Amino acid sequence: MTPKVSVVMAVRNEERYIRQAIESILNQTHADLELIIVDDASTDATPQVIDEYAKKDSRVRVITLKKPAGVCAATNTAIKAALGEYVAVMDGNDIAMAGRIEEEAGFLAEHPQISCVSSPVILLDEEGNEVGERKDITPGPIEKLPKNHNPIVNSTAIFRKKDFLAAGGYPDTQYAGDRILWEKMLKQKMKIQILPKPLLKYRLHTQGLTNAMYAGEGPQTRRQYLWTLSSYLLQNKKNKEAKTNLTKLIKEEPTRPKYWLYLLLSLMPTVASEKAVNLLLPKIKKIIRVRQ
């Protein structure tokens, strides 16, 4: 029998998307779960929304922080209160596939040597349109994290609570806390596995807990969103949509070479650009990192 799962969700000012996130967890095919939501001092209608769900579903527990603690500290607070043997992480702006918890928890139950499981993701834009899959996530065991990206999407992760605590939990930082946790787990010889199919719809947007609310909103944040979205659109052969976003970026910052390079890729025929993206994108990113 698969043990009880505690799903933890740290949120701040997520009124736009949080209903979808909560309902995607409450509608999971795995019934034996609880949802612990930590409200990190939201200033919008988020507290009212989560209280509404807590009143009508006994599986929902709410912890309210009076002052913003940050995503890592808020998540640690939720996990300390978790009753489940397994803990699954969820963001307040993403959407879990109906079978996510059942498949991830089932894999942990069948593989006692594994400490943490994650999955690929389907990317969504701000409006909920599917962008495609992240192409830099390879299913299988993780022995070492690549230097330039994190293949373990935090909001797809489920782990044994005892192993999470043994690794020291999330660090007290606002950025890259999940990567630091994975590195600590791997250093302690804990095994991490990425499952083969996407189990989460991951939203790219400018107002999420792990994004603008902690990094600061404004034109720069918006440009970063459009830049990231354009990159993923190109990788998923959606050149027309990428071109639209890149054109907006160039109007705002016409002297940024990387925008023009990506625009050039978006203007190529889709069949040709697929090979070009696979061959040139890593090289372009390397050049950009060196010059910036």
Image (tube, grey):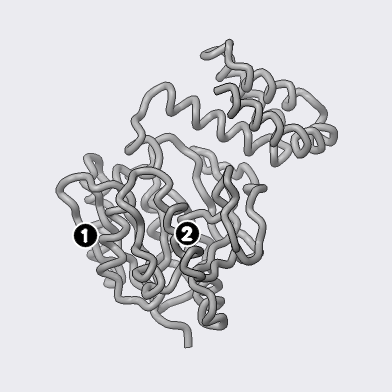
User: Mark 1 — residue?
Assistant: 63
- Of tags 2 and 1, the one toward the viewer is 2
Real-space CA distance between mark 2 and mark 1, rounded to the nearest whole angstrom: 25 Å
Q: Which mark is residue 182?
A: 2
Write the residue at 18% across / 52% down: 65
Query: Where's residue 146, x and y in %?
Result: 60, 50
> Crowding near pointer 1: few (<14 within 10 Å), some, many (20+)?
some
Query: Where's residue 230, x and y in %?
Result: 61, 31
Q: Tell me if 136 is positioned left or right of 153 in this view.
A: right
Write the residue at 68% across / 25% down: 262
Q: Tell me if 245 is positioned left or right of 238 in this view.
A: left
Query: Where's residue 13, x and y in %?
Result: 30, 42
Q: Tell me if 212 is positioned left or right of 112 in this view.
A: left
Determine the residue located farthest toward the bottom in the rendered image. Answer: 1
Q: Which mark is residue 194?
A: none
Is the residue 201 above or below the residue 225 in the image?
below
Viewer-side residue, 56 vs 166: 166
Viewer-side residue, 132 vs 53: 132
Viewer-side residue, 277 vs 162: 162
Q: Earlier in the sequence, mark 2 or mark 1?
A: 1
Which of the image's four quarters has the C terminus? top right
Query: Where's residue 90, x and y in %?
Result: 41, 58
Report the number of discs.
2
Is the residue 248 above or below the residue 63 in the image?
above
Write the residue at 38% across / 78% down: 85
Q: Are marks 2 and 1 in contact (CB under 8 Å)?
A: no
Q: Report the amino acid beneath label 2.
A: Trp
Q: Report the amino acid beneath label 1.
A: Ile
